[in-house]
């Protein structure tokens, strides 16, 4: 009912920390959980679990579980009920896992560069984007087999921005949300899964490096908004 009312479901134990959630369809959805404990040497052991529902959240089953010492799993994104992707931080380096059997098994895709990844999403089955710390935007055009690094800003005089979310509004435009920054990126025609007309511009020249910063001012219940790249 559009969020007006909610019903709770007992999904895991009270020691589980639920993380990412994604529903590729109205009935099929996935939720991650990280449970941590200590062994006899007082070393932390993380147990990652992936839950799946096929009835709109009425019931959930554990489809994958992994006890790890050196890495932790992050965000997930499923294209459909079988094909999905997951970010992972392993030995101070992020990597990406993908599955083609609904999360039962995962294949690691090592990255040729050192990055810290946070959020992942796909447009269609082949084109995907992942954002993270220090101006990180990587993308794939072959369903996650290989990934390329895309630098967004060339300003070396300030700390590179970090991004926490990436969201597509259509096949030609994605938005990056970061710390005091909101960035619009136009996807090149050759990368788009379908033919999409260029966004209509009423006047002027389009600037792909346009972005916005926001600074809350709680003392006076207001917010300062700055727009960069306008001309």
Image: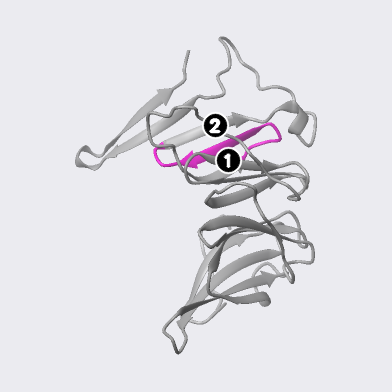
Q: Is residue 77 left or right of residue 222?
A: right
Return the residue nearer the eye: 46 or 226.
46
Q: In this view, does 135 lie above or below 1?
A: above
Question: Mark 1 or mark 2, which has the lower sequence index?
Answer: 1
Task: Please give the name of the residue rendered at 57% of the width and 43% of the height, measured from the top-left corner.
Answer: 166
Residue furthest out toward the bottom: 40
Q: Name the residue under label 2.
A: 152
Residue 178, how many percent across, how many down?
A: 46, 41
Mark 1 residue crowding within 10 angstroms, few (<14) / some (14–19) / many (20+): many
User: Do we see residue 59 in this rendering?
Assistant: no
Task: Please give the name of the residue rendered at 62% of the width and 42% of the height, measured from the top-left corner.
Answer: 138
Return the residue nearer the eye: 102 or 91.
91
State which region is magenta: 168-180
Task: Please give the name of the residue rendered at 69% of the width and 31% of the height, measured from the top-left corner.
Answer: 172
Residue 137: image tag: 1
Residue furthest out toward the top: 204
Task: Please give the name of the residue rendered at 68% of the width and 70% of the height, measured from the top-left corner.
Answer: 52
């Amino acid at each position: 009912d559009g969020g007006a009312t909610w019903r709770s479901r007992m999904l895991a134990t009270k020691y589980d920390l639920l993380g990412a959630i994604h529903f590729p369809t109205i009935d099929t959805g996935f939720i991650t959980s990280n449970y941590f404990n200590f062994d006899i040497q007082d070393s932390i052991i993380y147990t990652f679990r992936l839950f799946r529902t096929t009835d709109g959240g009425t019931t959930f089953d554990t489809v994958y579980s992994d006890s790890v010492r050196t890495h932790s799993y992050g965000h997930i994104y499923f294209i459909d009920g079988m094909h999905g992707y997951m970010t992972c931080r392993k030995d101070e380096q992020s990597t990406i896992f993908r599955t083609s059997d609904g999360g039962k098994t995962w294949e690691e895709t090592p990255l040729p560069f050192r990055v810290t990844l946070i959020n992942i999403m796909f447009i269609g089955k082949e084109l995907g984007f992942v954002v993270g710390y220090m101006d990180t935007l990587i993308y794939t055009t072959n369903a996650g087999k290989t990934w390329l690094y895309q630098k967004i800003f060339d300003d070396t005089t300030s700390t590179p921005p970090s991004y926490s979310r990436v969201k597509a509004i259509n096949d030609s435009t994605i938005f990056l949300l970061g710390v005091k920054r909101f960035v619009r990126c136009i996807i090149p025609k050759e990368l788009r899964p379908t033919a999409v007309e260029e966004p209509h511009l009423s006047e002027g020249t389009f600037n792909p490096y346009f972005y916005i910063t926001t600074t809350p001012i709680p003392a006076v219940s207001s917010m300062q908004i700055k727009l960069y790249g306008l001309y």
